[in-house]
Amino acid sequence: MTETIKTDVVIIGAGPVGLFQVFELGLQGISCHLIDALPEPGGQCIELYPDKPIYDIPAVPECTGQQLIDNLMQQIKPFDPVFHMDQTVDTLEKVDEQQFIITTSKNQRFECRAVIIAAGAGSFTPVRVRLPEIDRYEGKQLRYRVRDPNEFKGKRVVILGGGDSALDWALSLVDIAGELTVVNRTERFRAVEATVEKVQALADEGRLSLLLGAAKSFDGDETTLRSLTFEMRDEERSSKTIELDNLLVFFGLSPKLGPIENWGLELERKAITIRQDTYETSVPGIYAIGDINTYEGKKKLILSGFHEAALAAYGIKQVFEPDKKVFVQYTTTTPSVHEKLGVAPT
């Protein structure tokens, strides 16, 4: 075990909400370290849709997942957050009212006064294709996420899935791929209606193929995936083989709370219950923000998580300094905030 790292707050999760939490804590003069299982900050924004547009960030008409994370990283620079990536929290122990001990899968040990869980839906893994031995192509021709759309330029691409991710990527790749085929298992699509209509229109124009069926076998050798064979959803249950260069699979994610389930927190349907004025959990000193928490009227939106981060920071400040009134600080006019941000007063 390495030397104990001491800080005011440990944030578990470095997605967009966890990153904005750094900013809100920084405004209160509270230091923090972040722990995340992924190799780089950004959470699902970077893992699932780095190049997809986001339209509901206030005052930002459009940005990609990557741009959102880049901007958040720039915004929190004045507060010098410390990241501990590619590791998970193994144990979380409450020693005293304002003393927690955390250990990680890389044998790092933290001592802090409060803990904020911003772990999204917990750890998550993509739902995989259920064909024996097809995983030998994973990370090569078989992908569960897209990093660089131009990688598929001129290629024969097959997309499996009927949700938002599958159809959004179909729209993004239709002018890049040489041939594009989208295969959904049923007539029911789980994407927004407008997206389904756009994909159907492209299929009607012959710009992509839209099929209903389920993969039942593949052809390939140890290094190269050549084709997939599908059982079609027609009356004859006919078979269809599609030759391909790349297979993209978007069957959704399988979230798992992991060790969080063993931390003594009150849970409701795999989510952490909180009190809405401070976002504190059933264990005093542990807070939960973003998709990991639940309460009446909860909406799993990034902008909702930003709001929760602000209230959690004020709640923690009040606990740290119970004899002082915690005032709202305005980044436009508060001199102490300007000093923390390193900007000239107005």
Image: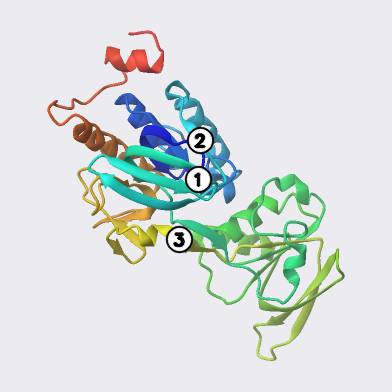
Q: Residue at x 38, y 32 (%)?
A: 7
Q: Count of labels shown?
A: 3
Number of other residues with Cα within 10 Å of mark 2, as a class: few under 14, some 14 to 19, many 20 or more: some
193 or 113: which is nearer to us?
113
Q: Residue at x 34, y 50 (%)?
A: 93
Location of mark 3 (residue):
258
Is the residue under label 1 in contact with that under label 2 (CB below 8 Å)? yes
Location of mark 2 (residue):
83
Q: Residue at x 33, y 28 (%)?
A: 30
Q: Amino acid at mark 1?
A: Asp
Question: Picture coordinates of residue 133 (x, y %)?
Answer: 75, 73
Is residue 145 toward the left or the right of residue 24 in the image? right
**Disc 1 on helix, strand or loop?**
loop
75 or 97: which is nearer to us?
97
**Disc 3 on helix, strand or loop?**
helix
169 or 272: which is nearer to us?
272
**Disc 2 on helix, strand or loop?**
strand
User: Tag on residue 36?
Assistant: 1
Q: How is the image coloured?
A: rainbow
Question: Picture coordinates of residue 203 (x, y %)?
Answer: 68, 64
